[in-house]
Image (cartoon, rainbow, N blue to C red):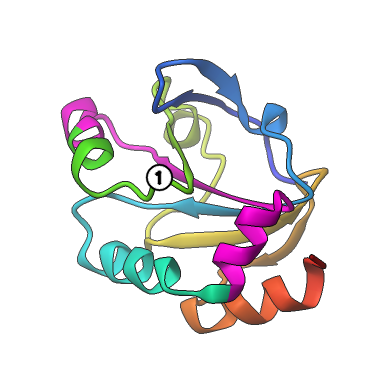
Amino acid sequence: ILPNFKIMLSNDSITDLFSVESEFMILYFQNPDCPTCSEVRNRMAKMETVNKAIASGKLKVLTIYFEEDEALWRRYLKEKANPAYLHGWDYLHEIENNELFDLRIIPYIFFLDKNKKVLKKDLLVNEIEDYVKRYVIF
């Protein structure tokens, strides 16, 4: 089970990872300016299985920005953020300060169940649809 941490959502509300309820979740650690992150986001946006699972309400995609540049995150929200996803910022920097995750390489993607138990970590972009098909029934 993943460690919990506080998140500021794109609507400026404060929550934490465990309060985001969903049968399944893709937790996507990223930086808005990271070229690979952008490529993965673009590929995910075209995944029919992922989009159907989100529309069914059984899957949430939560992007997490964990660095300090709030202006960069806000610009991403206006210009690049997928409206079908939840977007969060680790505004207290708990991830780095408490060494909750090893985020040397991004994007860093987890596939989680409703209890935030890791079903797959280091999920590769070409594995995403397979995991959604395997677990999410809609």
Q: Is residue 6 above or below residue 131?
A: above
State the image coordinates of residue 93 (x, y, percent, origin top left).
Answer: 41, 27
Picture quadrant of residue 12: top left
Q: Residue at x 74, y 53 (%)?
A: 58
Q: Mark 1 belongs to which amino acid?
A: Pro
Q: Residue at x 79, y 51 (%)?
A: 117
**Residue lying at 49% horizontally and 35% vertically, measured from the top left:** 95
Position of 37 compared to 101: left or right? left
Residue 57 colored in magenta in the image: yes
- Could you say where residue 64 lies in the image, as x and y percent from the top left? 44, 42
Q: How many marks?
A: 1
Between residues 95 and 57, which one lies in front from this camera angle? 57
100, 11: nearer the viewer: 11
Picture layout, residue 16 above or below residue 106: above
Of residues 49 and 126, the one nearer the viewer is 49
The residue segment tinted magenta is 49-74
Q: What residue sits 72% from the left and 77% below the top?
A: 133
- The percent coordinates of residue 60 (x first, y second) are 62, 49
Q: Which residue corresponds to mark 1?
A: 83
Q: Secondary structure at mark 1?
A: loop
**How many neighbours does mark 1 have within 10 angstroms: few (below 14), some (14-19), or many (20 or more)?**
few
Q: Is residue 63 left or right of residue 41?
A: right
